């Protein structure tokens, strides 16, 4: 099973829109397939209120403006709507959407091993979203943002093998909760 993801090159758009407000369109890709999500960001003194429309699906997200990583939360929100994993989205679910597995499959484990070595962002079949990148402050460290079941955690490890193990343990713990 593949999944729609916001390309890394479009994530700066999300960051910019959360700072300035307004309307934008963000493309999500799944191999050769592409879809577009339109969203509107309304800024208040304390909140960024986001309304998303993607085909027949719609959703709303409120973010504290002072919170770091809001663009990652918005990216995850867009991907969850696109992949039919968001329970609060309004509208019919895509016909090919399946229920989220409760365990890491062998395909998820393989993808986790790959992403821990290659750097990037992927959505797993279990619904977790993983983003791995080298640490800028410590050259011998890797960072991973892992979002699963509405929780996002930052993991750090000195090797891709240790990062893989940390991500797998965290995701399995979140799925079991």
Image (tube, grey):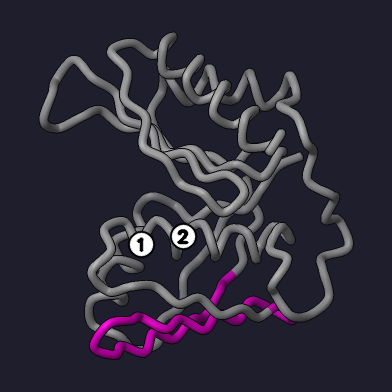
Horizontal side of 115 relative to 58 (left or right) equals: left
Question: Where does label 2 land, which residue?
Answer: 75
Q: Which residue is mark 1?
A: 71
Looking at the picture, how far across and down is residue 117, in whole percent?
41, 17
Residue 11 sits in quarter: bottom left
- Give the position of the N terminus as an image quadrant: top right
Task: Examine the structure image and report whether residue 58 is included in the region drawn in magenta.
Answer: no
- In which quadrant of the rendered image does the C terminus lie? top right
Is disc 2 placed on a helix, strand or loop? helix
Indicate which disc residue 14 carries: none
Give how far apart the Cα atoms at labels 2 and 1 are: 6 Å
Q: Which of these two is toward me, 23 or 130?
A: 130
Magenta stretch, residue numbers: 36-57
| Left or right side of 12 for 5 | right
Q: Residue at x 70, y 42 (%)?
A: 2
Q: Could you tell me which residue is drawn at 52 percent across and 84 percent down?
A: 51
Residues under numbered marks 2 and 1 in contact, where contact means CB atoms less than 8 Å apart: yes
Q: Which image quadrant is residue 83 in?
A: bottom right
């Amino acid at each position: 099973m593949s999944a729609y993801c916001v390309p890394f090159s479009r994530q700066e758009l999300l960051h910019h829109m959360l700072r300035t407000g307004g309307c934008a369109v963000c493309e999500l890709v799944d191999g050769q397939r592409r879809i577009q999500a339109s969203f509107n960001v309304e800024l208040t003194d304390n909140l960024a209120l986001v309304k998303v429309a993607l085909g027949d699906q719609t959703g709303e997200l409120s973010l504290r403006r002072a919170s770091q990583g809001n663009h990652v939360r918005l990216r995850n929100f867009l991907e969850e709507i696109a992949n039919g994993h968001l329970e609060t989205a309004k509208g019919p679910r895509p016909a090919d959407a399946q229920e989220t597995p409760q365990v890491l499959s062998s395909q998820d484990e393989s993808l986790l091993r790959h992403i821990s070595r290659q750097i990037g962002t992927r959505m797993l079949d279990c619904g977790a979203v993983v983003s791995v990148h080298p640490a800028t402050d410590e050259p011998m460290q890797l960072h991973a943002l892992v979002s699963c079941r509405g929780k996002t955690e930052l993991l750090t490890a000195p090797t891709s093998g240790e990062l893989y193990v940390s991500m797998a343990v965290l995701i399995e713990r979140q799925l079991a909760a």
